[in-house]
Image (cartoon, rainbow, N blue to C red):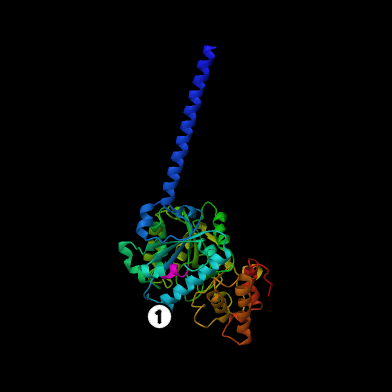
């Protein structure tokens, strides 16, 4: 009997010891979890502190599932283009519309890494969203990052548009981000952003980036450089597997700078030309996005639709390059931009406030004979709206 009692006491001590140990492990786990939340979405407290990050919406620990996007905002005039092309007010307006379209259609959180040459520009953009309803604000997370160029490449900052070449140095600027999508400010999402993000899943083991075909400029007498594929690439949207970029032969930055140094006398479109040259020599490392994910004025301004995917599926992302959203020379595309710009995030609803207004504005271009070459494309309104209406409740097809 005494032996059984001693055995029982021994077992009890082991159970108590095991329970105490388990309790200790749980406590340590929650301490680590709490500390990692304070580090921010990429686990680098110092980086977040230096960057002047603005935190809004949910607590930082809840942004770890966010999709990472790179956005560039710089003032001043570059070596090419008019004052309108370099106008920072235009860039802010466009970025505001881009953010509206993103949050209206997306169900996931988005982390926008804004590379800006002044805090004023950064806060001008972020403050555009502070009065939006909480259901939209909670999808957005912003971080400011200073403009950075290698010491020996400072002269590249003003090429084409100010900071246009900054994206070439993104893999060096964000060493702890594995993948991100670079986007121009003049984009309008007509399909959920997460669908664009999913193209990363289609990469094979060699792919380091994704862009859509240009289908203009390259392959014409105006172009004097090697370029990717049959029609070159447009760099307004660029998926970047940053880990793989850093691992290519000679490194991403060195490879791009070698292309720049060799062909700089022929380069007209700055970073886009440099990227085309690079992927001309490394075509197996690029995943080509369908053309409907970067639909531009040149794809319809000839009076015919040059993107079969847009005909079949509708436009997924509308890109207002060549000032197509603001200059008044292509009112079909500008009508889409103006409808989003006028949309009141606090009052209007997608179905009645946005979709119906867009149908009206597109029709107005025809009724009032607005300036537009794209209106000659049969069914252009349908091409523009086909994808969008899939994501708006009770939308009636045009």
Where is residue 201? Give x, y as percent: 56, 54
Where is residue 145? Give x, y as percent: 38, 62
**Secondary structure mostly seen in the magenta stretch:** helix
* Above or below, comparing residue 206 to residue 161 in the picture: above
Residue found at x 48% / y 27%:
16
Pick out the residue farthest to the left. 151
Towards the viewer: 283 or 236: 236
Q: State which quarter of the image contains the N terminus.
A: top right
Residue found at x 61% / y 83%:
364
* Above or below, comparing residue 86 to residue 55 in the picture: below
Towards the viewer: 374 or 216: 374
Where is residue 333? Give x, y as percent: 56, 77
Q: Can residue 232 be seen from the camera position used here?
A: no
Residue for badge 1: 83
Magenta residues, start to end: 124-129
Left or right: residue 377 versus residue 32 is right
Q: Can residue 242 be seen from the camera position used here?
A: yes
Q: State which quarter of the image contains the C terminus.
A: bottom right
* Above or below, comparing residue 42 to residue 371 in the picture: above
Quadrant in which residue 195 is drawn = bottom right
Quadrant in which residue 53 is drawn = bottom left
Q: Is-magenta flag for residue 140?
A: no
Q: How crowded is mark 1: few (under 14 residues within 10 Å), some or many (20 or more)?
A: few
């Amino acid at each position: 009997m005494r032996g059984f009692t001693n055995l029982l006491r021994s077992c009890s001590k082991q159970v108590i010891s095991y329970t105490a140990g388990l309790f200790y492990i749980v406590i340590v786990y929650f301490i680590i979890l709490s500390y990692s939340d304070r580090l921010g979405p990429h686990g680098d407290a110092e980086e977040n502190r230096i960057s002047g990050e603005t935190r809004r919406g949910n607590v930082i620990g809840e942004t770890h599932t966010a999709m990472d996007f790179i956005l560039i905002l710089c003032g001043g005039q570059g070596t090419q283009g008019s004052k309108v092309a370099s106008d920072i007010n235009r860039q802010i307006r466009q970025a505001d519309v881009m953010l509206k379209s993103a949050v209206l259609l997306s169900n996931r959180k988005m982390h926008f890494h804004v590379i800006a040459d002044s805090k004023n520009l950064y806060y001008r953009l972020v403050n555009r969203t502070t009065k939006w309803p909480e259901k939209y604000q909670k999808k957005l997370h912003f971080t400011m990052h200073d403009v950075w160029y290698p010491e020996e490449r400072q002269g590249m900052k003003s090429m084409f548009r100010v900071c246009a070449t900054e994206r070439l140095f993104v893999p060096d600027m964000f060493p702890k981000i594995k993948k991100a999508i670079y986007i121009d400010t003049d984009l309008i999402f007509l399909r959920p952003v997460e669908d664009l993000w999913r193209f990363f899943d289609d990469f094979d083991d060699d792919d380091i980036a994704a862009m859509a075909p240009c289908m203009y400029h390259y392959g014409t007498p105006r172009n004097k450089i090697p370029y990717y594929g049959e029609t070159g690439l447009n760099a307004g949207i660029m998926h970047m597997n940053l880990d793989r970029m850093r691992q290519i032969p000679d490194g991403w930055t060195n490879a791009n700078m070698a292309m720049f140094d060799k062909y700089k006398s022929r380069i007209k479109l700055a970073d886009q030309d440099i990227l085309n040259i690079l992927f001309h020599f490394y075509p197996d490392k690029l995943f080509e996005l369908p053309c409907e994910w970067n639909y531009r004025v040149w794809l319809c301004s000839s009076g015919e639709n040059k993107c079969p995917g847009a005909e079949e599926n509708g436009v997924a992302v509308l890109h207002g390059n060549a000032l197509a959203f603001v200059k008044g020379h292509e009112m079909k595309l500008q009508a889409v931009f103006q409808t989003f710009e006028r949309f009141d995030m606090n009052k209007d609803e997608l179905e009645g406030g946005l979709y119906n207004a867009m149908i009206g504005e597109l029709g107005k271009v025809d009724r009032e004979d607005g300036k537009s070459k794209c209106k000659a494309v049969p069914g252009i309104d349908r091409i523009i709206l086909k994808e969008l209406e899939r994501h708006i409740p009770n939308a009636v097809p045009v």
